[in-house]
Image (cartoon, rainbow, N blue to C red):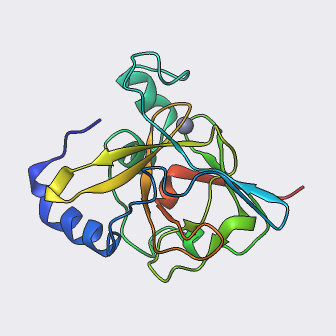
């Protein structure tokens, strides 16, 4: 999960820099789950590092079979899509955002906001079991990585410059998400 190709270093570094203007300190329990206007907003749990941490586990060959190359690049190779490249950044339709690998509910349109970054952005995960957080020190930067709580797939990063009530910005890769309209 944590390898990267050297020839991608420069472009990925540029993208990551654009998505990491501010280091998140929120994931270290500065922002616990909170209730605002009758809604509870969840703080992702940190990774435990245990081998059975993620209930959805597949071999690399199996992931290749069920994911598109773009999805595989984000979810299984910790990739970052080009900003404004996935249309979900500009999706304002009411509905839910699921993990492209296992259909785990990650985010809802209720917490989506326009961050201006070109990546789909949210201020809170949908449930207590949507995502987990890990410290990411790749490319010489320290950021908090967000992964799917069920399959461990890389989704993006979280920063503490988001809007109220949580002031968090979950900067997600649209290629890792599947959107479904509210029914
Ligand atoms: Zn998943």
Ligand 1 is located in which of the four quadrants?
Answer: top right
**On the rendered structure, is 182 left or right of 124?**
right
| Residue at the outermost bottom position | 116
Whether residue 133 is situated above or below residue 40 in the rendered picture:
above
Report x, y in % for residue 91: 66, 73
For the C terminus, the image quarter is: bottom right
For the N terminus, the image quarter is: top left
Q: Residue 50 versus residue 95: which sits nearer the camera? A: 50
Whether residue 142 is situated above or below residue 118 in the rendered picture:
above
Q: Residue at x 39, y 45 (%)?
A: 69
Using the rendered view, name the quadrant where residue 11 is placed.
Answer: bottom left
Q: Residue at x 25, y 71 (%)?
A: 17
Whether residue 86 is situated above or below residue 8 in the rendered picture:
below
Evaluate whether residue 181 shows in this view.
no
Numbered label tally: 0
Report x, y in % for residue 173: 46, 59
Whether residue 129 is situated above or below residue 35 in the rendered picture:
above
Report x, y in % for residue 61: 38, 23
Evaluate whether residue 40 shows in this view.
yes
| Residue at the outermost left position | 6
Using the rendered view, name the quadrant where residue 102 is placed.
Answer: top right
Report x, y in % for residue 120: 54, 68
| Residue at the outermost front position | 30
| Residue at the outermost top position | 52
Q: Residue at x 45, y 20 (%)?
A: 58
Q: Residue at x 45, y 52 (%)?
A: 27
């Amino acid at each position: 999960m944590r390898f990267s190709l050297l020839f991608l270093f420069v472009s990925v570094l540029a993208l990551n820099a654009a998505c990491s203007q501010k280091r998140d300190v929120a994931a270290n329990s500065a922002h616990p789950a909170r209730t605002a206007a009758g809604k509870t907003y969840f703080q992702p749990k940190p990774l435990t590092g245990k081998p059975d941490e993620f209930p959805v586990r597949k071999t690399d060959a199996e992931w290749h079979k069920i994911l598109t190359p773009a999805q595989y690049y984000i979810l299984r190779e910790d990739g970052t899509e080009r900003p404004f490249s996935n249309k979900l950044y500009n999706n304002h339709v009411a509905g839910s955002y699921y993990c492209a690998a296992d259909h785990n509910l990650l985010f809802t349109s209720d917490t989506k906001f326009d961050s201006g970054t070109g990546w789909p952005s949210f201020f809170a995960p949908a449930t207590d079991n949507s995502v987990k957080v890990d410290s990411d020190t790749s490319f010489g930067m320290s950021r908090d990585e967000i992964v799917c709580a069920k399959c461990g797939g890389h989704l993006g990063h979280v920063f503490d410059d988001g809007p109220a009530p949580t002031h968090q910005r979950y900067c997600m890769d649209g290629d890792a998400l599947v959107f479904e309209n509210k029914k």
